[in-house]
Image (spheres, helix red, strand yellow):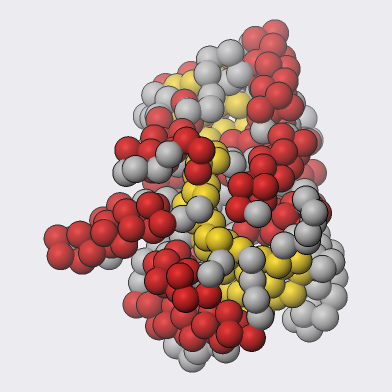
Amino acid sequence: MSQRPRVLVIAPQPFFTPRGTPFSVYYRTLVMMESGAAIDLLTYGEGQDVSIPGVRIVRIPKVPGTTPVPVGPSFKKMVLDLLMVVWTIGLLIKHRYAVVHAHEEAVFWCRPLKPLFRFRLIYDMHSSLPQQLTNFEFSKSRVLINVFRWLEDSSLLAADAVITICPDLRDYAMSRGVSEKRHLMIENSIFDDVKLSEQAGDGRATQPARMLETPPGAKLVLYAGTFEPYQGLDILLAAFAIVVKRQPAAFLLVVGGTPEQVASLQELAVTLGIADRCLLPGRVHKTEALRLTALADVLVSPRRHGTNTPLKIYEQLASGKPLVATKIWSHTQVLTDDVCFLVDPEPAAMAEGIVAALEDTIRGATASANAKALYEREYARPVYERKIRHLLELVS
């Protein structure tokens, strides 16, 4: 590119907190910077700064009573987004940005500002916001849902480029009028190590990883991710109660979740009689999560429903480990029987898949090799970088 474009990235979310870390924003920003963009990143006050050389992180003030910010639509987010609008206008007045990269609902206020400040607009669409209102049970009001749908449709048509993260969302965006030449599907498929700022002042930047011990000789089955109900962890635990009857050496490690979510699952493990074959340590440092993945015999994704492909699927593909995943659209947009053990989202089927992955080492090795090849071919960092460079060319 002949000039270094100045880009304002707007991420209306907590940026790097233990709950809901927005890796997609981090990796988009990192690779855009590496591709030659000068970037300011506007985000919520909650969270910890990360070190991305050449990127300036701008935070709105913390608002009492709004933390922790929950996942999905909420009145807390509405209050914070009003502040985001004010800060967006202030930055646009102070600086001349060639491009504004609006994540999620930020596009709703960037859309009317576009003709006033004459920037090119990128809409980074991680989900359909009208669908979120019902998926997170925020509102069933037809009026509110229709207002959000109108805002979303207007933004899709006005954006100079639209990013989606999976085939389902791509098809939805194109059904609402987005043309192929304005669309890029950029999956959340890279997972470089995140460098936290040493100036954060809360100790987490230098805190060592907590090392977990698993029983010697155990066949380790690992889940690492969020504990939201749609993740199907109750299915996983019920399945594991079946697995240990056939594979006494099997041991389940379930990483993530809030203290309340962990306590609830621990109660379920006791009820199912697998408390001594199951460890729920809560959240762990990323380096420890990577170590546990390397130790695992089988990885699992027991999600019960959904349409967007989970970020962890790409890490699981690249891991070289056998993967057992539920046969739902959220997974099968990416996964096939050639790269993993696909099972129905119910305990007996999940148990069969885990046992097969533990016992059928030839099939497991073949699927793991196919998965790694798929990741390198379709989702690895060089592929991601090419898409980001194309995005910058599209809006330059």
Residue 268: give x, y in percent of width and height. Answer: 43, 48
In this rendering, the answer to whether 327 lies above or below 179 is: above
User: Which residue corresponds to the image point at 15% horizontal and 65% vertical from the top-left?
Assistant: 143
The residue positioned farthest toward the top in the image shown: 362
Instruction: Report the side of 148 relative to 271 (left or right).
Output: left
> Observer-nearest residue: 36 or 223?
36
Instruction: Report the side of 203 relative to 72 (left or right).
Output: right
> Observer-nearest residue: 260 or 161?
161
In this rendering, the answer to whether 136 lies above or below 323 is: below
Residue 147: give x, y in percent of width and height. Answer: 23, 64
Q: Quadrant of the C terminus?
A: bottom right
Residue 15: give x, y in percent of width and height. Answer: 62, 69
Q: Quadrant of residue 367?
A: top right
Q: Quadrant of residue 92?
A: bottom right
> Observer-nearest residue: 222 or 331?
331
Q: Quadrant of residue 8?
A: bottom right
The residue positioned farthest toward the bottom in the image shown: 64
User: Which residue corresponds to the image point at 47% horizontal and 76% vertical from the top-left?
Assistant: 116
Tell me if residue 271 can be seen. no
In this rendering, the answer to whether 287 lies above or below 317 is: below
Tell me if residue 117 can be seen. yes
In this rendering, the answer to whether 41 lies above or below 378 is: below
User: Which residue corresponds to the image point at 46% horizontal and 55% vertical from the top-left?
Assistant: 159
